[in-house]
Image (cartoon, rainbow, N blue to C red):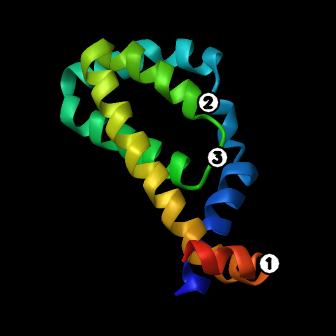
Amino acid sequence: MRIVVLLFMGAALAAFFIFDLNQYLNLESLKSNQAWLEAWYQDRPIQLAAYFGLVYILITAVSLPGAAILTLAAGAIFQLGVGTLLVSFASSIGATLAFLVSRFLLRDFVQNCFNARARTIN
């Protein structure tokens, strides 16, 4: 199971940098696509919110750069109330997944490095 999680994390990181997805996570890109995103939101608000939430969860869970820009994008596209709610849930779920992955992958390493202190905590 660890191999699958490591492969997924590695693939997500590699795809992010190989395909230069960071170019879409800046203010210029947000401003140039804002009208298109707002039109999409008017046509299919649930679909856009679901995709946006999944992307936000993935970026947060894998700890990729861009969460701050996505937070600003949520406010610009979904307005204050819906944007805040969407970012709040997506960031909490993503952070929980990041915690679980790091605990799952790094637990043995931390236990070996800090054996005496970890025994007290456990």
Q: Quadrant of residue 41?
A: top left
Name the residue: 40% across, 23% down.
Answer: 74
Q: Position of residue 29 (x, y in %)?
A: 60, 21
Q: Residues within 10 Å of mark 2 (few under 14, many from 20)?
A: some
Q: Residue furthest front?
A: 120
Q: Is residue 21 above or below residue 78?
A: below
Name the residue: 68% across, 58% down.
Answer: 13
Of the numbered discs in the image, which one, if any, rests on residue 25?
2
Amino acid type at circle 2 is Leu
Q: Nearer the viewer, residue 65 or 14?
A: 65
Q: Quadrant of residue 110?
A: bottom right
Label 3, secondary structure: give it: loop
Label 1, secondary structure: give it: helix
Query: Which of the image's four quarters has the C terminus?
Result: bottom right
In the image, which is nearer the foreground, mark 2 or mark 1?
A: 1
Amino acid type at circle 1 is Cys
Q: Are marks 3 and 1 in contact (CB under 8 Å)?
A: no
How far separated are the C-alphas under marks 2 and 3?
11 Å
How far separated are the C-alphas under marks 2 and 1?
37 Å
Q: Badge 3 is on which residue?
A: 64
Name the residue: 66% across, 39% down.
Answer: 65
Q: Badge 1 is on which residue?
A: 113
Label 2, secondary structure: give it: loop
Q: Position of residue 26 (x, y in %)?
A: 64, 23
Amino acid type at circle 3 is Leu
